[in-house]
Amino acid sequence: MKGRVLVVDDERAIGIAIQRLLAGRGHHVDTALSAEDAFGRLAESAYHIVITDLSLKQASGMDVLRWTRQHAPETAVIMITAFGSEKIAVEAMKLGAADYLPKPFDNDELQLTVERVLEGIALRRDLRRLQEQVEGAYQFERIVGRSAAMQRVFDVVRKVADTDLTVLVRGPSGTGKELVANALHYNSARRGRPLVKVNCAAFTRELVESELFGHEKGAFTGAATAREGKFEIADGGTLLLDEIGDMSLETQAKILRVLQEREFERVGGNRSIRVDVRIIAATNQDLEGKVKGGSFREDLYYRLNVVSIVLPALRERVEDMPLLIEHFLAAAAARLKREPKALAPDAYRALCAHEWKGNVRELEHALEQAVALASGPEIGLADLPASVRGDPEVAARSDESAGSFRAAKQRVIERFERQFIEEALGRHHGNISHASEEMGMYRQHLQLKLTEYGIDPAKFRTRR
Ligand SMILES: Nc1ncnc2c1ncn2[C@@H]1O[C@H](COP(=O)(O)OP(=O)(O)OP(=O)(O)O)[C@@H](O)[C@H]1O
Ligand SMILES: [Mg+2]
């Protein structure tokens, strides 16, 4: 690996000698004559390695080390120490130096040290990328859902993941918008490059812009050093603009320009920066309403809404509940290192009756709490959060959404009942008397259910 190296030495001749030597091996080398000078350069651009002499005239090499660890933690520091100062070398290593070179050293020693440190950097970077890929490979599979609505989501994700199309992911809070963004990125050819996420709602306009576009040194009070923005960091990868509905009109105009021209300037700068970034935007807001109301630019809306993925609220896909419950119980048990436990029927009924305003996130947290609290052989009603335990009344409310919720719940109950009956019939090879006996049901009642669900007991007779 060829590196970018900064040499800090107040003896110009030494700096230049090191520069010549390393440049001869293909590295890019800059020199600085003082700690101050070095800080300026480090703030302006990124280096893999800083090689600094321990004894500089003003601030010492230790100061360079400390400053670099703090402000440019990705940059490795090699300390040049005087003959016989092992103690200080050890001190430097404790403070996070990558290596040290006792004087006098020859060219080979210098080259070897630099190359070893660069190798370490390359390894760590590969490892991190590998790690991200391993984690990412499961992202798609981690989205649980069998409902027709979720099948449609998977279908679109599969079709557009490996394209550069802009995707707008919508849905109420906690429905899995970020999961979808992950699935899109990790199923695209960009998966080896970064997926960078920016929450557009979390900051003031100035901060969002410096977060997105970066800033030059001195762009505003507090901008002591220049910084890359998320667009630059995401180069070659994907940028998730989260909570896009909460962005100021000024910032919207700037985003629109990047989308159209693929270039921008850092805050306080005038150099144009070009990037290759795939954009995914997410929001739980009514963007069309915001366009009508004038707080969201129509042109940006069309630019972002090339492909639209809508995640329905959990109560509109109650069919997914059993799978999600199973998934989160197992995940929580594994995370908390507990034996997996079954859910008691009353706890299950309470989960089905709850409104889930916080959607899948709320369900995940409720089950995690339940797994942590449960002390009996199964997870009971008492282990669920009070908010979930106490609201059959809420579910019974007669407003419209509760109505559609009840209808959906009814479908789930029916599905379960049908499965229950079919399994019993299977066990008894289609014998209605035996099956009804096992289920504790009147024979006539089972007959009615069979007609209602269109189940043919003859089908199970052949399975002997
Ligand atoms: N279909 C799903 N399968 C498995 N886990 C899910 C699913 N949907 C959501 N989750 C989990 O629920 C939590 C919330 O999901 P996520 O952060 O993606 O939601 P969001 O839509 O981005 O919410 P917000 O609008 O609040 O940012 C996460 O822990 C996520 O793993
Ligand atoms: Mg989110």
Image: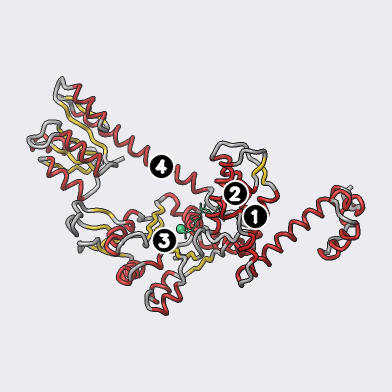
Look at the numbered discs 3 and 4 and tell me whether their residues touch, using CB distance below 8 Å: no
Q: Disc 3 residue type?
A: Asp
Q: Which residue is mark 3?
A: 242
Horizontal and vertical percent position of residue 267: 23, 62
Residue 274, how many percent across, how many down? 30, 61
Classify residue 265 by image quadrant.
bottom left
Q: Nearer the viewer, residue 331 or 377?
A: 377
Gap in angstroms between the C-alphas marked 4 and 1: 42 Å
Disc 1: which residue: 350
Q: CA distance from mark 4 to mark 2?
A: 38 Å
Q: Which residue is mark 2?
A: 384
Q: Secondary structure at mark 3?
A: strand
Which amino acid, mark 4? Arg
Question: Marks 1 and 3, how far apart in space?
Answer: 33 Å
On the image, the x and y values in percent for residue 341 come to 65, 41
Q: CA–CA distance between discs 2 and 3?
A: 31 Å
Q: Give the label, 1 or 3, closer to the camera.
A: 1
Q: Within 10 angstroms of label 4, few (less than 14), some, or many (20 or more) residues?
A: few
Give the residue pinned by disc 4: 128
